[in-house]
Amino acid sequence: MPEVKPDFPREWVEFVDPADPDGDRFRCDITWLTSSWSCIYGNGCQGIYAQTPHDGCCSEGAMYSDKDDEKRVLKYAAKLKRSEWQFFDEAQPKRKGGKLNISEVDEDDERKTRNVQNGCIFLNRKGYQAPGFTGEMGCVLHHLAIREGVHFVETKPDVCWQLPIRRSFEKLDLGDDEVLQVTVIGEYERRGWGPGGVEFDWYCTSNSEAHHGKDPVYISNAYELIKLMGTKAYAVLKEICDARMEARRQASPKLLPLLQVHPATLLASKGAQEGASR
């Protein structure tokens, strides 16, 4: 199925942060958050580069959001075992008592996880075998979260667990020298990756192949949204999205286009219906 073009109509909702009624606001992309996107890594994901389809979006390594992000990843990386991590030996400190060698600086002098063999150092490659290795394909920090009984929000770099939700910040000028901060919650489109995003051979958020989720994004990614917004703000968002989903279920075919359903979700739904009718 094709990837939909960007800049299609979207529905946004803006509300005051319940945790700060006199201050900040949230602006949320309802079209994206009520879409049926779901991660299909290992189940149809073609990867951002055609030559490494099994690497998903882990071909570049992950940018750290700040020092605390890197520190947290280091803490959990120290819990990894050689038997579960393909690049365990590669990550060992260069000197005794030093830190794990998991980070590097890119061409823009930004710190990120190391790129080893054309992929993130935490990515176990498909088909890798070695004596004593019992790990699984994919992000070893994700697998660690399962082993530790925690959500992967705790173990993975911020950018990894936030994808494909994008949080950004804007200023809203109300006049009379009153300026508020607006936290924007939206879709992490391919162009969100910068100039390199245009070169991706495949990308999931705008591709109908990844829009077959059982639940809409605001439900399936509730944990991540709460981490990004806070419990009270998420409760407001959920109430709005619940109402939008109910309106969509009750709407006649003529009114449905007015609700701005994500076009990739529409394509996926149409494909599923056509397949069922055959």
Image: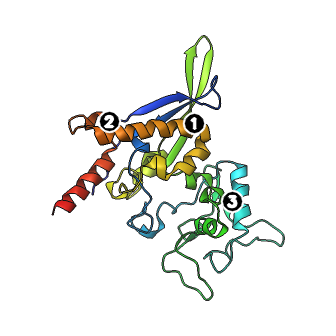
* Label 1 crowd bin: few (<14), some (14–19), many (20+), radius 10 Å: many
Query: Disc 3 or 2, which lies upstream in sequence?
Result: 3
Residue at mark 1: 233
Can residue 192 be seen here? The reply is yes
Left or right of 7 on screen, residue 25: right
Corner quadrant of residue 133? bottom right
Residue appearing at x 36%, y 40% in the figure: 246
Under circle 3, the secondary element is helix
Under circle 1, the secondary element is helix
* Label 3 crowd bin: few (<14), some (14–19), many (20+), radius 10 Å: many
Q: Could you tell me how many numbered marks the image carries? A: 3
The amino acid type found where label 3 is placed reads Val
Residue at mark 2: 259
Label 1–label 2 contact, CB within 8 A: no
Residue appearing at x 42%, y 53% in the figure: 215
Is 131 placed above or below 212 here?
below
Query: Disc 1 or 2, which lies upstream in sequence?
Result: 1
Left or right of 2 on screen, residue 134: right
Corner quadrant of residue 251? top left
Q: CA distance from mark 3 to mark 2?
A: 40 Å
Q: CA distance from mark 1 to mark 2?
A: 22 Å
Residue at mark 3: 73
The residue nearer to you, when weighing 76 against 46, is 76
Q: CA distance from mark 1 to mark 3?
A: 27 Å
Label 3–label 2 contact, CB within 8 A: no
In percent of width and height, residue 42 lies at 44, 69
**Extreme-bottom residue of the structure:** 131
Q: Quadrant of the C terminus?
A: bottom left
Label 1–label 3 contact, CB within 8 A: no
**Extreme-right residue of the structure:** 97
The amino acid type found where label 1 is placed reads Ala
Query: Disc 1 or 3, which lies upstream in sequence?
Result: 3
